[in-house]
Amino acid sequence: SCKSKSCVHINLNLRDHHFDCPTKEQNNFQETGIYKDLDVVKNLNRSIRKSKRGNSGNRIRRNEGKVFSEKKTFSDILKGLLPYQQIPKYMQDNKYIHRYYVRPCNSSLTCFKNMLRLHNDTVSCWTHLLNGMFFLYQFIAILFKPMDLFLGGGFEKLLIAFWLLSCVISFFTSVVYKTHACHSTLWRPTWTYMITGIILMILGSLLSWFYYLLHCWKHLQIGYMIFVMVI
């Protein structure tokens, strides 16, 4: 074996690499810095260490031959949502809701996809959507019911159908607005649609209520129903 001090022994991964004794021309490598093999091997060792650290960071548990990745926490699910102070002015409609707002966007498809993730309007969107589907089913069902089931004949059937349709419009327009509240341009027209749907639902509810409440007083019934429609 070589006992020269200028002979280089380098540990690369698992085995030692041995370099022969340098010549007189190569004895100056420590002073001139021209010995490139040493730098190359050092760089390789550094890259191997970095790759090992990266692999150790990705923790994977093995159980009965199956690989399980780490479970997502609740904070991971809510990652990417914004607090009230960071959302645009058009989204700041309720200062008492402090956090968990979706990010602003310009795509309707992205707005509807937000229904599939958890944020501060997820429950509201789904409850309104399910209610809208329920009233839509009732509206379609009442259209096929015979006139004999209604004491007031065709007018009563039309009145109930109008009330059910107003509920459908109100719930569906509410879903459209709540999903598009983060849209930079469509938030205003969808807000108008939601307000219109709410007014129609109030009108249909009041007409039905006065119809059955004042059923024995026809003049008051007609007067109140006309008054509500004019207002």
Image: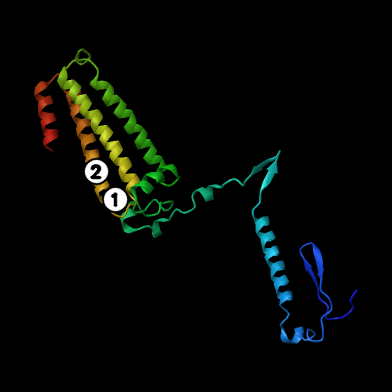
Q: Position of residue 62 (x, y in %)?
A: 69, 44
Q: Position of residue 15 (x, y in %)?
A: 81, 63
Query: What number is the disc on residue 229?
Result: none
Q: CA distance from mark 2 to mark 1?
A: 10 Å
Q: Position of residue 188 (x, y in %)?
A: 26, 51
Q: Disc 2 vs disc 1: Cβ atoms closer than 8 Å?
A: no
Residue bearing mark 2: 193
Residue 121 visible here: no
Q: Secondary structure at mark 2?
A: helix
Residue at 35% over, 45% down: 179
Q: Secondary structure at mark 1?
A: helix
Q: Residues within 10 Å of mark 1 (few under 14, many from 20)?
A: some
Place residue 208 in its image quadrant: top left
Q: Is residue 228 above or below residue 47?
A: above
Amino acid, disc 2: Tyr
* Quadrant housing the N terminus: bottom right
**42 or 105: nearer the eye?**
42
Amino acid, disc 1: Trp
Residue at 36% over, 54% down: 105
Residue bearing mark 1: 187
Q: Residues within 10 Å of mark 2 (few under 14, many from 20)?
A: some
Residue at 32% over, 58% down: 89
**50 or 172: nearer the eye?**
50
* 168 on left or right of 50: left
Q: Earlier in the sequence, mark 2 or mark 1?
A: 1
* 142 on left or right of 123: left
